[in-house]
Image (cartoon, helix red, strand yellow):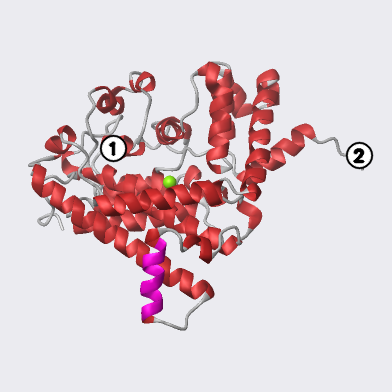
Amino acid sequence: MIADRAPYASVPENSRGRRLREPPPRGRSEYQRDRDRIIHSTAFRRLEYKTQVFVNHEGDLFRTRLTHSLEVAQIGRSVARHLRLDEDLTEAITLAHDLGHTPFGHTGQDALNACMKPYGGFEHNLQSLRVVDVLEQRYGAFDGLNLTFETREGILKHCSLKNARTLGDVGERFIRRQRPGLEAQIANLADEIAYNNHDVDDGLRSGLLQMEQLSTVGIFRRHMRAALREFPKIEGRRLVHETVRRMIDTLITDLVRQSAATIREYAPASVNDVRQSPPMIRFSERIRREQTELKQFLHTNLYRHYRVSRMSSKARRIVTELFQAFLAEPGLLPPEFQERARSDTPRAIADYIAGMTDRYAIVEHRRLFAIDIS
Ligand code: MG
């Protein structure tokens, strides 16, 4: 494996290191240690009860952030392996990429960001970094998970320039307009492949989307026809699955092929060259256009479906009302967050809310607002 690694791959032995120096791991690489720490974290387990699009308890069959993260990791590893990059680093980044997500998916994040506007805002990528740098409390020697620079820089996918200036090493690339390593670039697009496809699948499963509607979308139609050519009699869930698995295969194959071509074109000799070059992990132009069409379809027909909007509206109210209640009376916070709140009350409230699962947020809201007479 190591002999086979491409010259532009990240190499665990050459890592820029951890914030706090630790003895090198035995029997596993630095990036494998990162991945293991992420899997054992509390925030990782909570992903099971956080929403992707559907509220967690709507049905047992839908994706949660945990299954989403596992799908992203699987896709990311395949691509990394084909391009002879460090699979373990890609896996660590993909498994951690959503750790900072609020309950209720993007609605929760937008609501919390609106509440935090006067206090520095809330960005979920930054929060994922905060989880692994500060919020996890498991080790005697340090707060957070003390991950390597490369995993941390991959987790911080986007970041405002204002925040980048406060982040030290991982903020530098936003200021210098550089790229992260290819393993991080893969994590980004593996995320996109996973959610576009599982949202199609969950959308159909929930009945919010119909096959006829999806047949108007180029990439779906093309792969559905291919599935029917091979299995003319299949229908229902089986047809959906045969279509979606073909789409995922096409996307991964295209991503590997196009990225390999781009890498050949820029011919980076090292990770350092990768950082100075334009993004090299890319889809071909045709697939990029098809992905955009699919995304637009999902926006109009799934994410803005009235039943999803009703859930989002409730979620927005829950997050906003929780925030306001805690801000008015920080004494309502659990003791560990009260302690944090002494230095920065709004940030402590955001940390508390962001860490909640969907169900916990609903229950906490009820605890604070419902007056039960029984
Ligand atoms: Mg994601």
**Kind of residue at badge 1:** Thr
Which class describes the residues within 10 Å of circle 1: few (<14), some (14-19), or many (20+)?
many
Q: Is residue 290 left or right of residue 350?
A: left
The disc placed on residue 177 is none
Residue nearer the viewer, 181 or 26: 181
Q: Position of residue 370 (x, y in %)?
A: 81, 36
Residue nearer the viewer, 12 or 318: 318
Residue 182 vertical placement versus 290 (above, below): above
Q: CA distance from mark 2 to mark 1?
A: 52 Å
Q: Residue furthest front?
A: 216
Which stretch is magenta? 220-229
Residue 86 vertical placement versus 166 (above, below): below
Which class describes the residues within 10 Å of circle 2: few (<14), some (14-19), or many (20+)?
few
Q: Is residue 266 left or right of residue 219?
A: left
The disc placed on residue 148 is 1
Residue nearer the viewer, 100 or 149: 100
Q: Which residue is mark 2?
A: 373
Q: Position of residue 325 (x, y in %)?
A: 70, 25
**Kind of residue at badge 2:** Ile
Quarter-wise, where is residue 34 in the image?
A: top left
Query: Magenta-highlighted stretch: main secondary structure?
Result: helix
